[in-house]
Image (cartoon, coloured by chain):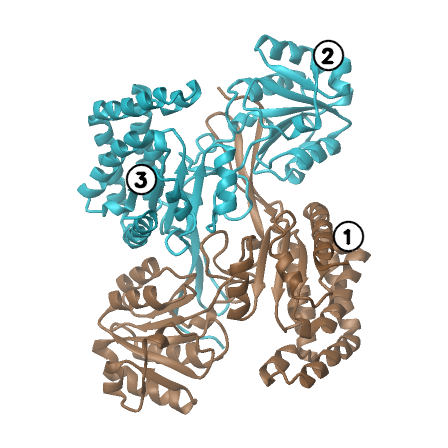
Chain colours: A brown, B cyan
Amino acid sequence: MDVQTYMHGVGRAARAASRLIAKADTATKNKALLLMAQAVERTSKQLMAANAVDVDAAREQKLDAAAIDRLTLTRTNIAAMVDGLLQIAKLPDPVGEILNMRYRPSGIQVGQMRVPLGVVGIIYESRPNVTADAASLCLKSGNAAILRGGSEALHSNQAIAACVHEGLKATGLPETVVQVIDTIDRAAVGELVTMQEYVDVIVPRGGKGLIERLMRESRIPMIKHLHGVCHVYIDDKADFDKALRIADNAKTQRLGTCNTMETLLIARSIAERVLPPLCRIYVNKGIELRGDEAARAIVPEMKAATDEDWYTEYLDAILSVRIVDNIDQAIEHIAAYGSQHTDAIVTEDITRARQFMREVDSSSVMVNASTRFADGYEYGLGAEIGISTDKLHARGPVGLEGLTSLKWVVIGDGHVRQ
Amino acid sequence: MDVQTYMHGVGRAARAASRLIAKADTATKNKALLLMAQAVERTSKQLMAANAVDVDAAREQKLDAAAIDRLTLTRTNIAAMVDGLLQIAKLPDPVGEILNMRYRPSGIQVGQMRVPLGVVGIIYESRPNVTADAASLCLKSGNAAILRGGSEALHSNQAIAACVHEGLKATGLPETVVQVIDTIDRAAVGELVTMQEYVDVIVPRGGKGLIERLMRESRIPMIKHLHGVCHVYIDDKADFDKALRIADNAKTQRLGTCNTMETLLIARSIAERVLPPLCRIYVNKGIELRGDEAARAIVPEMKAATDEDWYTEYLDAILSVRIVDNIDQAIEHIAAYGSQHTDAIVTEDITRARQFMREVDSSSVMVNASTRFADGYEYGLGAEIGISTDKLHARGPVGLEGLTSLKWVVIGDGHVRQ
């Protein structure tokens, strides 16, 4: 069977399954999730054995240490997977919720009902635990899922898929509610992102290369972010201790995440006070600093930043630093170089805070908090399928609600239009 | 200047203007709307003179009567335009509204702030009053607008644009907040729907031909519906009088609107009772009926419906009629042939009503009310920029909220991630 025929078969089956999972009741979906968690726990040895096959092959293919680390399933990963499934079972069912039901002057009642999107295609790279996370979020939100993991994680993903299918089967739900693509042919991705008749939304999770490729190829709307060039702006009315704490945490708590700060902006009038102690913190933690001329006048050890630096998501132990005249220039810098992901201001001044919140056009805007908080779990979504920097449909961390839509419901008693 | 250079200039100006209108305060936006309304009222003679130029040209080009009717600005149209501007001024400003602000266990406060989408491109056909409607909805929701009306309405649209610009200018807002394309070159549309860097969303308003063309060409998300094949299902537990009233109104109150019923579904066990009196109503109003075999067995004068009929949006005095076994078959029919626009059930049974509301996957689902209610004004949105049958972002009638997005706002007091 060629890839196109295979993928269209998967698409058709997903579309049919989506109608059944959309009307599945809450108890059935939760039971399926509990059974999946039990299956993952019970078969954890088999999961680790399947994963070992992938890891061995990855070693043979000389994948780098970070990639192998992402690929490896540990006892901790598996426990987190089980925990994730149980948590999603506990979250309220978003499907069928009716919002804003009101009587209109005509006498009809009008409201909006939350409904699933239909079929969600998820394309991800090495981490096999995404298989369980994505499957459970789609299931709970009443969607059918088509999962395409990295080819290097094929055995691990198939083993996790078996647990997912066990839960579906035992509750009488069709196994086609969650389908895991079992070909490593890259053409499968090309088919997935162009099957408009079968797939309602694509969620790509992976590096910039993957996302850029999909942005060119996809004919289906995506929930995505390309990169996270996050900023912290230390205003001249900032509290000194909070500024240090936040600028430190936003950069150094974890280096490789999309909500990590990549550029620090400091108001000119307090730069001499704030920059030297901050630099000591960074240098002690092994962070390389790249500054503009004004920053280097204060801390001459800093390398010079180029224009390219302001655009760069390092995902590494590097930070660019710029001195700005004021909040307006900080907002201008973020608009010009940022990626609309997450940006924070440190200030004690409420007018500045109001201005920053209103005018910075990013998916998360923060006042006196570390950019590292931009995360579905921290925001109370329970879990996230991804983070979106787009404006249409879902923005920022996307949980169950982002996998739903609102349809209008109208109830009358024989009402007709005059 | 070639079309591409012209359109990219328009796009750049719109992007710059979008940042200014996004932060404009509510009073300024409302004042601009009031001044626009005054300008339309004051210059109504000039508007009608400009419109006469378009109408004369359209007559010379032998446009059909319906097209000329849509193009013509009457005193009533102009009064409606003025009224629309005033109404939008009175609606609450959606921009900056913060929803669901809650404390999280970490101590941060997390909420969602409503923000404009940015730049909205609107492509429409003959009706010149769309110029004022679309401009005012975009302005109030803090978006910059690029309007491309039908070439046959060019003079009318320019005259209305002058009123819009008068209001912007007098309140100190840049005139580039609303730009009306002044070339009739169709290549301008091709540019508009592919300038991803300058345009955030396209709202096409027009016939199926226009929408289909844009679906092929656009690289920008659209808020749209292709067509409205709306159904009324008369359940066997329907109230007889309500069934007649709703089935009559949904078809005959207006023939040419997207929320007009095109197919009537009737439960087999009450068809003999309901269909004959309904047919008399329809025939008296000049509606041609096309039925399936079972319907024709009851009313033999009916023409035979083909499979094609079930897919057809007549927008005309034609109705297709099908007898179904039960609610499940009605829902199946709507899923197979419908356009996910608006579908209604007539029933006194709450279990049937619940099932229909949950399982019919349309942008508006109604119980005991005419499909003709599917409209932004009837739903309480104040006005609508269009109706969407898509699931992502906005579904059903789209008002000010559909022209906004939600960004996350986080407020802490020096909080960092553990």
Quadrant position of residue A128: bottom right
Q: Would you name the residue on which mark 1 appears?
A: A173
Crowd rating for badge 2 (residues with CA inside 10 Å; few <14, some 14–19, many 20+)? some
Instruction: Give the residue type that dot 1 points to.
Output: Leu
Q: Would you name the residue on which mark 3 appears?
A: B183
- Of residue A84 and residue A152, the one placed in the foreground of this image is A152
Q: Label 3: state its secondary structure.
A: loop
Relative image position of residue B336 (x, y in whole percent): 69, 36
Please state if B271 lies on the left or on the right of B50 as rendered.
Answer: right
Instruction: Give the residue type that dot 3 points to.
Output: Thr
- Of residue B211 and residue B298, the one placed in the foreground of this image is B211
Relative image position of residue B298 (x, y in whole percent): 76, 13
Instruction: Give the residue type that dot 2 points to.
Output: Val
Distance from Cα at disc 2 to Cα at disc 3: 54 Å
- Residue B417 lies, with reference to residue B61, above or below; the image says below
Quadrant position of residue A188: bottom right
Chain label for disc 2: B
